Image (tube, rainbow, N blue to C red):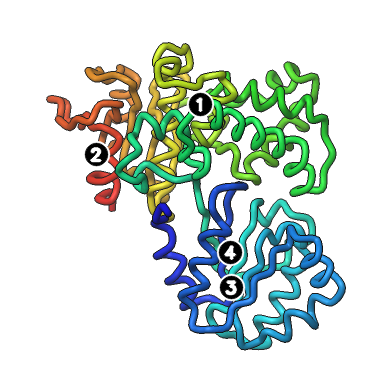
Amino acid sequence: MIQRQIQINIERQLKLFPAVAVLGPRQVGKTTLVKLLAKNQKKTIHYLDLERSSTFDIVKRDAEGYLSAFMNDCVIIDEIQRMPELFPLLRSLIDEKRKPGRFIISGSAAPELLKGASESLAGRIAYSHLNPIGLHELPKNISMQQHWLRGGFPQHLLLNDNASRYDWMDSFITTYIERDLPFLFDVKFSTVTMRKLWQMLAHLQSGILNAESLGRSLDITGTTLKRYLDYLQGAFIINKLPPFYVNIGKRLVKAPKVYISDSGILHFLLNIHTNKELLSHPSLGASWESYVISQVMYAKNNRTDAFYYRTQAGAECDLVLARGQEVKACIEIKHSKSPVPTKGFYQSMKDLKCKNNFIITSDDTEYTTKEKVKIVGLSVFLKKHLPGLK
């Protein structure tokens, strides 16, 4: 089993909070992780899988009476989005007996998008996000090139042949579109339109969002398009990278960049199934850029925020890491063994007055240019430089 680095953080939370929620996309390993976490609790464990009809019916009939019987135990509630009305009950039960580690919850959707989940659990619950397996978590028998091609969903990553990986991802995407998304958010939409949206997002990977234009291409309004994107983001399929706003007297690009989080999903949608196909594909640069951004997002701490920076005059930085308004790093991303910083990147460094400037490449290298830009491989950046951006 692949060791997940988030486990240490969640174990710490279980000593402080009455409830801990582990959120992440389907098939990312949440159930495996919460069961592992439960083994370390010095309490009797009760596991409730709300995707099992028998368990769902029992809890639905008398949730308060059922859960009240386990006041001194640890209760795992798997896939809580099936019953978001439990959130207000959890608040009441926690306030009745406020002790750490009473509930371990897993979910495949952001709670703020679930109907009935608006009840505040502030101060009672800690949320942790379980991302697909990151480069910093890879076992030694899997290379970065394999990880980039396959993505980080455990089952898909560990399958050894192309045919099996194709079948797995085809089933995963179809199930998400036809069953999971409508069920998660209690909405109806055209599955044909939603599949086209996934395909278009793949071809627009890491592009700046133009909701009206993309909506017209799908024959839906920009408002509807934004709602669909909210569902995909709420289900942890896409990410929106916001622009970095700074008062420098320049006209800034203010729309977010949108990218499919997992490179395995992206490559399936682009019909890329081998590393050779990837290296010759027109989307190579966009794929590498989004892969790097995802890996940095997975590995960074929660106090560091991620943005991009672009002005109407041409200054551009692929990734800005900041805390508040303080820029910690400017990063340009290039799939090249001999990258050259662009004029737009130099202008971004000047605009943002950043001292830590990097170009992240696909080569396992590290050196500094005369302009004090560090040229580093992704693995080197994640292991050596990212932890030092304090």
Q: Which class describes the residues within 10 Å of circle 4: few (<14), some (14-19), or many (20+)?
A: many
Which kind of residue does numbered mark 1 sit on?
Answer: Asn
The quadrant of the rendering that contains the N terminus is bottom left
Query: Mark 1 against mark 4, which lies toward the viewer?
Result: 1
Q: Are marks 3 and 4 in contact (CB under 8 Å)?
A: yes
Which kind of residue does numbered mark 3 sit on?
Answer: Ala
**Image-based side of 89 in relation to 125, left or right:** right
Q: Secondary structure beneath disc 2?
A: helix
Q: Which class describes the residues within 10 Å of circle 3: few (<14), some (14-19), or many (20+)?
A: many
Which kind of residue does numbered mark 2 sit on?
Answer: Val
Q: Are marks 1 and 4 in contact (CB under 8 Å)?
A: no
Q: Position of residue 151 (x, y in %)?
A: 47, 35
Furthest toward the left, the residue is 370
Rendered residue at 79%/65% (across/down): 56
**Mark toward the start of the polypeptide (3 vs 2):** 3
Q: Which mark is residue 21?
A: 4
Q: Position of residue 330 (x, y in %)?
A: 32, 35
**Mark toward the start of the polypeptide (2 vs 1):** 1
Q: Which mark is residue 19?
A: 3
**Image-based side of 82 in relation to 269, left or right:** right
Identify the residue position indicated by label 1 in the image: 162
Rendered residue at 48%/29% (across/down): 161
Q: CA distance from mark 3 to mark 4?
A: 7 Å
Q: CA distance from mark 1 to mark 4?
A: 34 Å
